[in-house]
Amino acid sequence: MIDTNELTLTPEDYDKAFTEVSFLLDMFVETIVTFVGKSTPSLAVAAGRKMANNMPIHLTDSSTADALNEFIRVFRIQQMEIDAHLEGKEAVITINHCPIRSVCLKRGMEMDGQACQMFHYYIAGILAELTGSPARPKTVETGEQCTFNMMFSMVR
């Protein structure tokens, strides 16, 4: 039997884990930007496309509305406070208490900087794969509530 202590974790243990994850995400983003440069958005989109294939989603119709609803459903399962709606060819996505924002604050990273942009392009990759249509994010607002639009090239 494996002796584990998951049931005896303290708030201090969670704070330490958050500090470590924040550090690792900061280093990950900096490394990607350094080595990939201007192709960083493409890398984030590719990662999102790969993730979409691993998500518990099965769409018989890859309509933008259905894909967006399933994406929101899965992210809410992960306890993310996220909402979205369609406005013409764009999806308006709002995240309350964004975990990337928390990391940015912890590490002194720029709001709407590289980490935020990579996350938005990552989501663009997920939605592009689910809809079968290229998607491009545009940040509207960052802060306690983050809002960005996702523009689809070929909305059905």
Image (tube, rainbow, N blue to C red):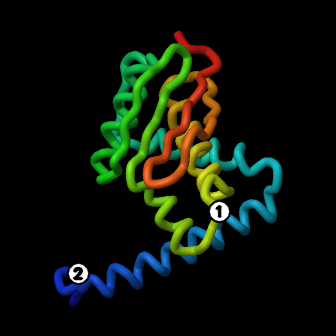
Image spot of residue 102 (x, y percent): 47, 65
Foreground pick, 80 / 32: 80
Q: Residues within 10 Å of mark 1 (few under 14, many from 20)?
A: few
* Residue annotated with mark 1: 110
Q: Is residue 116 above or below residue 52?
A: below
- Neighbours of disc 2 within 10 Å: few (<14), some (14-19), many (20+): few
Q: Is residue 125 visible?
A: no
Query: In the image, is 13 to the left or to the right of 107?
Result: left
Residue type, label 2? Glu
SS class, disc 1 = loop
Q: Is there a contact, CB below 8 Å, between mark 2 and mark 1?
A: no
Circle number at residue 124? none
Q: Earlier in the sequence, mark 2 or mark 1?
A: 2
Q: Secondary structure at mark 2?
A: helix
Picture coordinates of residue 47 (x, y %)?
59, 48
Q: Quadrant of residue 83?
A: top left
- Frontmost residue, 125 versus 121: 121
Which residue lies at the image location 40% right of the left edge and 32% below the top edge?
84
Judge left or right: residue 99 versus residue 139.
Answer: left
Label placed on residue 6: 2
Q: CA distance from mark 2 to mark 1?
A: 33 Å
In the picture, measured across the screen, residue 81 lies left or right of residue 110, that is left
Q: Is residue 109 visible?
A: yes
Mark 2 vs mark 1, foreground winner is 1
Q: Quadrant of the N terminus?
A: bottom left
Q: Looking at the image, is 68 positioned above or below residue 101?
A: above
- The residue shown at (60%, 40%) is 139
Nearer the observer, 17 or 112: 112
